[in-house]
Image: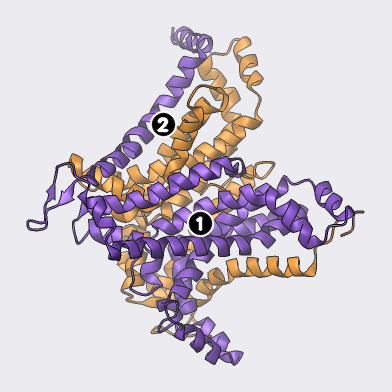
Amino acid sequence: MRSDGSPRAGFGLKLSAALGILFLHVPLALIVLYAFTTEDKSFAFPPPGLTLKWFATAWHDRPDIWPPLWLSLKVAVIATALAIVLGTLAAAALYRASFFGKESLSLLFILPIALPGIITGIALRSAFDIMGIPFSTWTIVLGHATFCIVVVYNNVLARFRRTSGSMIEASMDLGADGFQTFRHVVLPQIATALLAGGMLAFALSFDEIIVTTFTAGQQSTLPIWMLNELIRPRQRPVTNVVAVLVIAVTFIPILLAYYLTRDGEHTAGAGK
Amino acid sequence: MMAARAGTVSDFFFRRPGLLTLALLAPPLLWIGVVYVGSLFALLLQSFYHLDDFSGLVVHEFTLSTYAQLAAPANLAIITRTVTMAAVVTIAAAILAFPIAYYAARYAKGPMKALFYLAVMMPLWSSYLVKVYAWKLILAKEGILGWLAAQLHLTPALNALLATPVIGGPSLSISYIGTFLVFTYIWLPYMILPIQAALERVPKTLIEAAADLGAHPGQTFRTVLLPLALPGVVAGSIFTFSLTLGDYIIPAIVGNSRPFIGQTVYALQGTAGDIPLAAAFTVVPMAIMAVYLTIAKQLGAFDAL
């Protein structure tokens, strides 16, 4: 190993890292390829031919795609809004305070993503049963907001740790009240972290299936629609087209979240 | 008038930071406390009830008989199967993740580093179901893996692999090999990020010092790098292990018909209506994760999260 200048990676390391990255990306690339295949009965590789007609079919002939898509978007928007408020409050409360049990409290906020989703799902479902709450959009939102809080919490907490508390004191010393300080000092500092956390929460909710199957009842979100197509395929190429759409809808907020927090904070999304 | 009142409120809180913390903390804490922890307790409570065999109704009396049912051979087999899969997936993910994390932490610079980061984040965040679906395409008999094996004249080797008892099956998508591949693929990014975070903190000089003192690269890896990266590996394994323990969709879509814990819980609470046994089953991963998290905390894994 050379100890002068910049180190060079060995061939073995380079190769295994490259293969690992390839392993992560080939399946996603294949999904995109299959959206254009002319073969509609099997998953034959290589595709016998390429066509754009499945995009038109999905758009015109499959009205069953739209209601689940709207429901997913609606749930994701409401859950994200709730998570932004609650996650920011939790981060603001915990970043400077020190009191007995603080560690346990922060663990509590992480718990919904540390425990398997099926536990959250069945716990919520049995609680709805016991309390006689009928399934609705709100039962789905309740579950989603619970695990979205931690995503916002992580992002905002990381930002708070980098900002100085003396700014807030200075603002108060100069005569601003708490709300003015929040509006003009705190909010501009945490805005991008909030936005990034919100983007990630949105992507997380839009894609969630494990908890949703327990809290949706007869309703169908886009992931539930997709799961049904996986178990009982009707038109495989249409499922491929929807899969490509889902990849696009989740990639955009993730990229945005990355660019919003890239200087210094590599926490965005690390805690999915 | 409004401003004066607002000023009074903020003065009040400024002088009592403890109360401010409480006021900020109350809404999120109530949410998590009531919605989440409340539901968990409701679930835990149900595991102490039991299902009446004749009426098929849940009897609301305290009993441990539901937990005793967990020890039935069929149920123990489900638990063993799931824990084994979680362990194997975790080990495989750690082995695959290490070179990627090491390269990204030590050699990638500037735009290359950003590229590596995004290359891990994109698969992590892209849709879970789409990823599972992608593997259904890959593992299908007529899919790309079968095609690749045929191109490389390896079809007999693939068939021999599928003929292996226990892990084999009629095709890759109906075998434990398939289930294992999908689990490893889907949780791999969760392993890469914490290992990379741990490796970023290893000073370059330490590795150079090991080399200067005459250690082979292998020795440096074993005695310097690995112990320092261990908290990251443990942090990553929290995710790979926990997520595998509770998943019920992957083994249902790619795998043979022998169930995992997640599928069993799903079937018990749904068609069977045996909520008490379903609840008792979920206590298994909860207990395993509680022990796991305690050990992880001892090993300093939370600093690497």
Q: Would you say residue A84 is visible in this rendering?
A: no
Q: Would you say residue A230 is visible in this rendering?
A: yes
Q: Which circle marks residue A243 in the picture?
A: none
Q: CA distance from mark 2 to mark 1?
A: 27 Å
In the displayed structure, A161 sits above or below A216; it is: above
In the displayed structure, B3 sits above or below A244; it is: above
Colour in which chain B is drawn: purple
Q: Quadrant of residue B119?
A: bottom right
Q: Quadrant of residue A169?
A: top right
Colour in which chain A is drawn: orange
- Which residue was labeled with disc 2? B28
Closer to the N terminus: mark 2 or mark 1? 2
- Which residue was labeled with disc 1? B240
| Closer-to-camera residue (B111/A146) | A146
Query: Marks 2 and 1: CB-CB under 8 Å?
Result: no
Q: Give residue B270's position: percent from left, percent from top.
A: 22, 58
> What residue is drawn where x is 48% and y is 65%?
B183
> What residue is drawn where x is 36% and y is 52%?
B284
Q: Is residue A97 left or right of residue B38?
A: right
In this view, the residue farthest toward the left is B55
> What residue is drawn where x is 50% and y is 77%?
B138
Q: Amino acid at mark 1?
A: Thr
Q: Give residue B231's position: percent from left, percent from top.
A: 62, 47
Residues beneath discs 2 and 1 located on the same chain = yes
Q: Amino acid at mark 2?
A: Pro
In this view, the residue farthest toward the right is A4
Q: Is residue A117 left or right of residue A11?
A: left
Looking at the rendered structure, the number of numbered marks drawn on it comes to: 2
User: In the rendered structure, the residue with mark 2 lies on which chain?
Assistant: B
> What residue is drawn where x is 87% and y is 57%?
B214
